Image (spheres, rainbow, N blue to C red):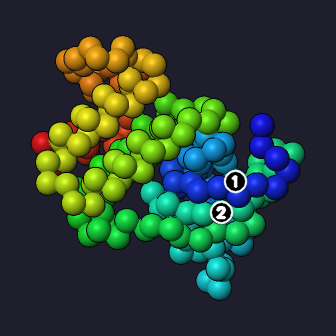
Amino acid sequence: MKPHSYSSDGIVLSRRNFGEADRILTLYTKYYGRVSAIAKGARRPKSRKRGHIEVFNLVKFQAVTGHGIDLMTEAEVVDDFKEIRQSLKKISLAYYFMEVINKITHEGESNTNLFNLILNSLTSLKTAKKLKVLRLDFISKLLILMGYWPHGVLLPNPDEELEKVVERQIYSKRVGKRMIQ
């Protein structure tokens, strides 16, 4: 259970606009799992949080638990993965990773190993040449880590198994497959 006020490292999985100047963020944190938080005033031009809360940024943040959704009070970039942002193929794969994590996890389920898998995959993506191998490796490790596939058994078709698990279509999959062959 989260304390009233908490601080953690987190990877921004998604963001969406809320109201006139706010953003709702979904982060995967090191100690609290997937967390949703509202960043008040983040869309204002003079907001200090504005550049820190981009998708797949690694951020150190502070938040306060609310009645429905947590309130992010501070955010600071630890790594913005700028090397990934210079390649369209790498960006599409990073968004694919974020979408998969967002769909396979539930709010509040913490898993430090999963956080490390996401972070290691994004770090590997900075210098990766074989993106398809990285994508399939990510899916295989994810399914094993989450308990959907037995450890030590070869996974013949990671994409097919992932679709069975999430029971929904991964929207960035087509981009992930077509561009990352």
Q: Which residue is nearer to you in this view: 22 or 48? A: 48
Vertical side of 160 occupied by 98: above or below: below
CA distance for labels 2 and 1:
10 Å
Q: Quadrant of residue 56?
A: bottom left
**CB under 8 Å between discs 2 and 1:** yes
Q: Quadrant of residue 8?
A: bottom right
Residue at image coords 77%, 43%: 2
Residue at numbered disc 1 = 37
Residue at image coords 47%, 25%: 146
Could you tell me residue 21's position as x and y percent? 69, 70
Q: Which quadrant of the figure contains the N terminus?
A: top right
Residue at numbered disc 2 = 61
Counting residues from the start of the chain, the first of labels 2 and 1 encountered is 1
Q: How many marks?
A: 2
Residue at image coords 26%, 14%: 153
Q: Which residue is nearer to you in this view: 164 or 35? A: 35
Could you tell me residue 94's position as x and y percent? 35, 52
Q: Is residue 133 left or right of residue 106?
A: left
- Residue 148 visible here: yes
Could you tell me residue 151's position as x and y percent? 34, 18
Q: What secondary structure is marked by label 2?
A: strand
Q: Is residue 34 left or right of residue 181?
A: right
Vertical side of 58 occupied by 68: above or below: above
Q: What secondary structure is marked by label 1?
A: strand
